[in-house]
Amino acid sequence: MINYPTILENPNDVKFHLDEGEIYLFKEAKELISIQHYSYSLFAIWNATIINLQKRIEFFGINNLLEILEKKEDYNSEGNSLKDRWLNINEYTIIGIARTLNLISHTTHDLISALYWMKSSTNTEAQKKIDETEIYCLLYLLEKNLFLKKYKKDMRTHNENDISQNRRKEDNENITTNLQSETSLSKPVNTQAHDELLLKSNMQKFEKQTKEDEENEHLIDKYI
């Protein structure tokens, strides 16, 4: 008995960091495999893979993408959805972009390229020869080399943001300290008023104690 790859069996697993679109496509692929429509399942797996690459590229930084695009206008930065933003960029080109930005390894690049040619083949006989085991092997490799990999950050941008945040934090702390110092200096202590309040408080305590002592004496006299 053949076991499903984890990503096919449970695409909701948080370790894959898949969005709703990717999850739906892997569920669709599983269903197509179950009814032996293996060639069609490749399209669902391919679409999920491309979405994942697009997300990784955008996460790494749009500026980095625009630097290597021959036609920067092909990427629609004003698009409201992933599909709208990438509509004018060839899907096969996206594999090369991800590799150029070092977001995937050579191995991953070759695996995704193999998936592309498998799903794009017009040879009917070749399509018929695709079987369940072949798809599972490809998925196991993609799971390990792509879907389980963490999203890469552009450390240059990341470090600059961290430095800015630390500077803003230090500046705020300095401003707060200075304001507290200025506030304490701008309000000199009125020692005369303080002494008067202290004296008044002590007198009230003394009068209260004297009254209690007098009441106790009267109580004793009553029973003698």
Image: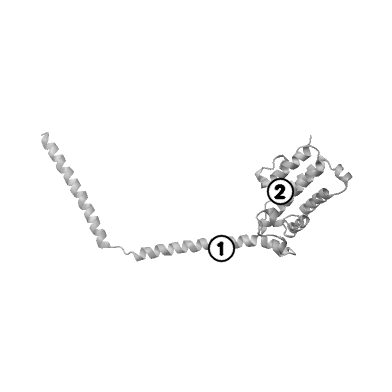
Q: Which mark is residue 164?
A: 1
Residue 210: x, y in percent?
A: 17, 46
Mark 2, residue position:
147
Task: Kindly identify the residue that appears in the image at 67 percent across and 42 percent down.
Answer: 13
Whether 222 is drawn above or below 47: the answer is above
Task: Kindly identify the residue that appears in the image at 76 percent across and 45 percent down.
Answer: 139
> Residue 195: which quarter of the image?
bottom left
Q: Residue furthest right?
A: 125
Q: How is the image coloured?
A: one colour
Residue 150: x, y in percent?
A: 67, 51
Q: As drawn, is 29 to the left or to the right of 224?
A: right
Answer with mark 1 or mark 2, whichever residue precedes in sequence.
2
Instruction: Find numbered disc 1 in the image and state the secondary structure of the residue it sits on.
Output: helix
Report the Cα–Cα distance between label 1 and label 2: 32 Å
Task: Kindly identify the residue that appears in the image at 49 percent across and 64 percent down.
Answer: 171
Task: Kindly identify the residue that appears in the image at 80 percent across and 44 percent down.
Answer: 40
Q: Amino acid at mark 2?
A: Phe
> Residue 84: which quarter of the image?
bottom right
